[in-house]
Amino acid sequence: MDEAERRHNYRVDAPPGFLREVALWSGRAGADGRLTLEDLGAPDVLGLAGTGGIALTDVSTRGLRMRLSTKAAQCLGLASEGALPVGLPVGGLHVYLKLLSPAAGAVARNYTLFLWTRVTHVDHVPGAVLLGLHITSRGVPEKAEKAFRMFDAGRYGVKELTRWCDEVARMGRGLQPAPSPGLDLEHLLAEIDAARACGVMQANRN
């Protein structure tokens, strides 16, 4: 395997605190490689800073793995094995991601992506659903209308995810400092949501 292929296939565990925003849509369809906001509509599942029952567990340049709460899985029709059709769900999922860059002094603090994915596996565990997604295309915003133009990403993946994986790997080797635990004003609402979620989890433990 050459260096380019290795970079296309390696994946990293997603550390907590780096998923700023995530939204999932099931069964949306555009036409002629375009998807308008009218076609897209409101997301089926939405999460901010780790809330909403969606956790990103690992990332590669061509795929994502997520852990969904039972409630979030229900919104996507994936809550129980009995509710699934034969085989994997068809129709795929659109995924919006905003990932915080772990690189100190990064020019782009966030990697913001809109992706079309194919579901590769669905595993049911107590209280959750584990989801595997293969990225087939990415959406680029149109300049003259409220729509995405979808471009193939199945072969070469998404360069921003490759860069993010590299940054996370460098941080794990101690080559970059971890993000500050202090308040981030740029993401105040997400910080409030995360603090509220932590408070609920602590109360449940007690």
Image (cartoon, rainbow, N blue to C red):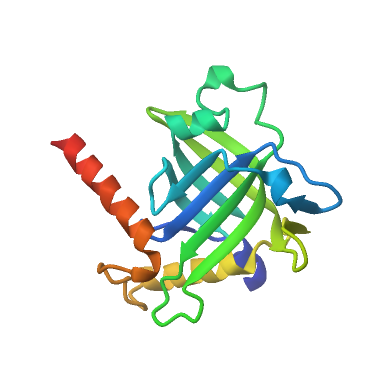
Q: Quadrant of the C terminus?
A: top left
Among the 4 quarters of the image, the one containing residue 3: bottom right
Residue 138, percent across and down?
69, 58
In the shown orientation, is residue 2 left or right of residue 200?
right
Q: Nearer the viewer, residue 21 or 6?
A: 21
Residue 127, percent across and down?
38, 29
Q: Quadrant of the N terminus?
A: bottom right
Q: Residue at x 51, y 60 (%)?
A: 98
Q: Is residue 61 visible?
A: no
Residue 84, percent across and down?
60, 22
Q: Is residue 172 above or below residue 68?
A: below
Residue most extreme to the top: 82
In the shown orientation, is residue 131 left or right of residue 119?
left
Residue 40, percent across and down?
68, 45
Q: Residue at x 75, y 68 (%)?
A: 143
Residue most extreme to the right: 32
Q: Is residue 50 visible?
A: yes
Q: Nearer the viewer, residue 35 or 169?
A: 35
Q: Residue at x 49, y 45 (%)?
A: 46
Q: Is residue 196 above or below residue 70?
A: below
